Amino acid sequence: MSTPTQHNRIPSLRLLAAATALALALPATALAQSEREAELEQRVAELERMVRSLIEQQASQPEPVPAPQPEVANPVQRTNIVGASPPGTTFGYGGFIKANSTVSNYTDGNPAPGSVGRDFYLPGAIPVAGVGPVADPGSGPVYDAHAKQSRFWLTTDTVLESGDRLGTRFEMDFAVPAGGDERNTNTYTPVIRRAYFTFNNWLFGQEWSNFMELGALPESTDFIGPTEGIVFVRQAQVRYTNGPWSVAIENPETTLVPFGGGARIVTDQNQIPDLTVRYRHTADWGLLAVSGVARQLRRDVPGQSSSDEFGYGLNVTSRINFGANDLRLMATYGSGIGRYLGLNYFEDGVLDASGRIDALDVFATYLAYRHVWTGTWRSNFILGYTSADNPATLTGPGANAKASSFRVNLMWSPVPRLDFGVEASHAVREVEDGRRGELSRLDFMGRYSF
């Protein structure tokens, strides 16, 4: 195969050959004529000069550069570094680092060292004399410090070419660890908080219950605040949202008081999911949310007949704005919804002598007023209360009957996303026969959100 340079030199060689042939083809008689000889010699010389000029010009030109070929992209570069995500996916992350230091004084002994009742307010963890074992019978204040409530989350958001929208969220903290202690390194296992994906108006995975409203939670240095008055549940669900309305089927669970009292029974034998529905309205003045739950309570013991009972609940939540200040409240009433309130402070029902379920009626509420003193200083005044209508002949004298708390705090945010706070609180736990246990606590908090 000829090279580009060889092809370009062919015209030059042809000119040289033509000139030579022309000279040889001249008649012999013409060579004798001096004038014609001189003329021919001049023409040959001119042709030779032209050929030399073409050869020199060709030699001075650079080799032609081949046309650029399309570059094959690296397949690794075509794949997102965090997975084969669709084009246009936006990744996000966030969370906060939170440190708490508490001084707690219990009237009837202390909860077990390292227990969640020492880390945040859990009404069912307040010891009451004569009700269950007290792991630490010591008296006097106890000091605890930890960073277990620190939190981290990852999110994605994708708008497809079809116009459909996909999203995900994965969130964890260490607030209720499965392992760890305070002896050396204070290491604690992370726990899943929220893990779900969304497709347009649908949500699949673990998220806050649709029976719960987050938009009016009080601001507290504590993990929750007025725990006894709050609907507080995260669980697996399938939810559909359309405007202000949302409906979900959620993971069911039944908790029961044994006949005559005793340790909690958790059955995990429900046959149908909990059904929740919520309406949420927001405006300049604040928000109003109304939600309901309908559920099955069920227990099945081999060799005995199964027992089913119907449970239901209604929740009303609101936040009313007064300029920079606001009033936040929640009120919940129902039968058979104990596990939805106060971190399962009450059970859903109690067993009678024949093993059948009797749903417990419960009520819970909180009221919180938030006042902004200046641009960086604010306070919250918070009340919480809950009660159950226990049939004492079934539940026994030691069943949880009431709980209440009061707390006031002072919060300071010197720069955006940085918060410091101090909070004083007092809480009371009361069982069915009137015995009480009390907790007084001073809580210091520092938190940076990123």
Image (cartoon, helix red, strand yellow):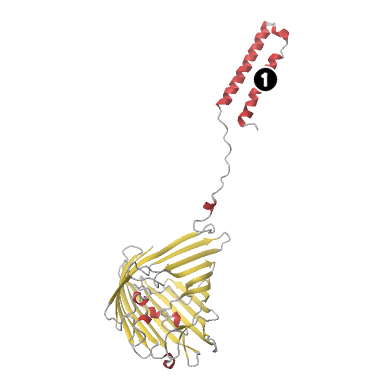
Q: Is residue 410 visible?
A: no
Examine the image and state in which quarter residue 325 appears: bottom left
* Furthest residue toward left: 140
99 vs 64, left or right, is left
Crowding at dot 1, Cα within 10 Å, few <14 / some 14-19 / many 20+, comes out as few
Q: Measuring from the top left, give residue 197's x and y in whole percent.
A: 51, 67
**Quadrant, the N terminus:** top right
Q: Is residue 277 visible?
A: yes
| Residue drawn at the location 33% of the way across and 62% of the way down | 415
Q: Nearer the viewer, residue 303 or 52?
A: 303
| Residue drawn at the location 68% of the way across and 14% of the way down | 23
8 vs 90, left or right, is right
Total marks drawn?
1
Q: Measuring from the top left, give residue 74's x and y in whole percent.
A: 54, 49
* Residue on which disc 1 sits: 17
Is 154 placed above or below 369 here?
above
Q: Measuring from the top left, give residue 360's x and y in whole percent.
A: 45, 87
User: The disc labelled 1 sits on which kind of residue?
Assistant: Ala
**Quadrant, the C terminus:** bottom left
| Residue drawn at the location 56% of the way across and 28% of the way down | 61
Q: Secondary structure at mark 1?
A: helix
Is 145 placed above or below 50 here?
below
| Residue drawn at the location 27% of the way across and 78% of the way down | 141
Q: Measuring from the top left, give residue 375's x and y in whole percent.
A: 32, 66
